[in-house]
Amino acid sequence: MKYPRFLLADNAENDIFYVIHTDFPRFILNINTDELEFWENFDEEEAKGEYDTLVKEAFDFYDSEIEQYDS
């Protein structure tokens, strides 16, 4: 099974939203606090530009998904 590149998750108890990136490097992004946790080990200095782009894409994905619910 091929998973979507990004998934949206929430924790209603704490009113927190997360975006999960399912491709390498996999990560979970807390939308409320901007905390980012990677699930793989890699050289962050070498991949700095790449994961900055992925984080921006994760926020864009979140905005797009929430916009659909607000419509």
Image (tube, rainbow, N blue to C red):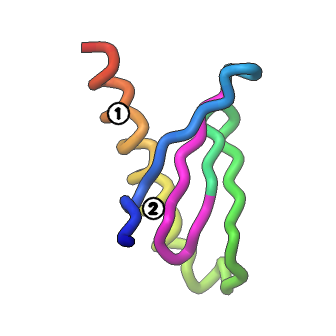
Q: Counting other residues with Cα less than 10 Å from the Cα at mark 1, is it few (<14), some (14-19), or many (20 or more)?
A: few
Q: Indicate which disc residue 65 carries.
A: 1
1 to 43, vertically: above or below: above
Asked whether residue 20 is drawn in magenta, I would say yes
Residue at the extreme right: 14
What residue is shown with label 2? 54
The residue positioned farthest toward the left in the image shown: 71
Region in magenta: 16-27
Residue 60 location, x and y as percent?
37, 43
Residue 61 position within the rendered picture, expressed as x and y whole percent measured from the top left: 37, 44
Instruction: Name the image quarter holding residue 43.
Output: bottom right
Q: Where residue 36 sits: x, y (%)? A: 68, 54
- Residue that appears at 61% across and 49% down: 29
The residue under label 1 is which amino acid type? Glu
| Residue 28 belongs to the span the image colors magenta | no
Left or right: residue 19 versus residue 71 is right
Q: Nearer the viewer, mark 1 or mark 2?
A: 1
**Disc 1 to disc 2, C-alpha distance:** 16 Å
N-term-proximal mark, 1 vs 2: 2
**In the rendered image, the vertical position of residue 25 relative to residue 36, given as above or below:** below
